[in-house]
Amino acid sequence: MTVNEIIQKIQEQVRQAKPDATYLDTVLLFDLNQVLDEITAEQCLTELESSDTLSFDSPDEFDEEEALTYLQADLPADYHHDLYEAYNVTAKQPVIIHPNLKALYKYFEEGGRTGDYIGNVAVQGSYLWALPARSETMDEEIISIRYYMQADDLELDGAGPSCIPVHLHSGLLVSGVLRNKVAGLSPGMASLHEQRYLGAIASLQAFVKSPSRQTPFIRRHARYF
């Protein structure tokens, strides 16, 4: 479906809810992009898999005596979610992905944050944080990453999103907008489109059966009884 076709279907449903109701196409386009972002933020869609390389140089802060080291690099501008692979190109070694910055620092709590090549990273905010660092004047290290990028915004007179199967455009995009847009006009219709949207989400998850997804590393401590 094209964007215009999707908007036309939304307008038709709005008029069914209230004959004299209508919205500007630009308003519905905004809603469509909001729904698309919501879907792509929660689902791992094959067409949105992407890769890039990040460079790490000397630490932003380094105190050898206190063993404080902070390494960070800006994530790619199109990064959306789920860093699922990291690899140290310089050292030719895989890199452990931690759930967050706290977990990354906790991994090093029993020792300093300096050592061999970078082998641990975590995403927090718009940065990729990394440890350990070799010295205050460490050489550049290159980390390659794989992740899910943001979908391009839809445009009037443009094609529908290629990252979503065409047979799910109606359930995900049309109903995705209508479940909120007609809530004040026809609660029953809004509920119907909510169910259609949820059904389409389930179909999408079944369609993408085994997405690339990294389970973040969590250190396990032995427990003795």
Image (tube, helix red, strand yellow):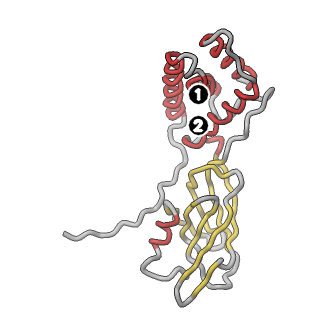
Q: Where is residue 135 in the image (x, y as percent from the top left)?
A: 62, 85
What amino acid does circle 1 point to? Gly
Where 4 sits versus 211, above or below? above
In this picture, residue 187 sits left or right of residue 72: left
The residue lying toward the viewer, choosing from 109 and 177, is: 177
The quarter in which the N terminus is drawn is top right
Residue under the point 63% across and 32% down: 164
The residue lying toward the viewer, choosing from 62 and 217, is: 62
What amino acid does circle 2 point to? Ile
Where 53 sits versus 18, above or below? below
Q: Where is residue 169 in the image (x, y as percent from the top left)?
A: 63, 25
Residue under the point 61% across and 24% down: 181
Residue 114's quadrant in the figure? bottom right
Residue placed farthest to the bottom in the image? Answer: 65
In this picture, residue 122 sits left or right of residue 14: left
Say whether disc 2 or disc 1 marks the residue closer to the N-terminus: 2
In the picture of the structure, the residue carrying the numbered disc 2 is 39
Q: Nearer the viewer, mark 2 or mark 1?
A: 1
Q: Where is residue 216 in the image (x, y as percent from the top left)?
A: 48, 58
The quarter in which the C terminus is drawn is bottom left
Disc ID at residue 109: none
Where 223 sits versus 25, above or below? below
Where 212 sits versus 193, above or below? below
Mark 2 is surrounded, within 10 Å at the Cα level, by few (under 14), some (14 to 19) or many (20 or more) other residues, namely: some
Question: Does the CB distance between marks 2 and 1 fall below 8 Å?
Answer: yes
- Distance from Cα at disc 2 to Cα at disc 1: 9 Å
Could you say whether the residue bearing mark 1 is in a helix, strand or loop?
A: helix
In the picture of the structure, the residue carrying the numbered disc 1 is 176
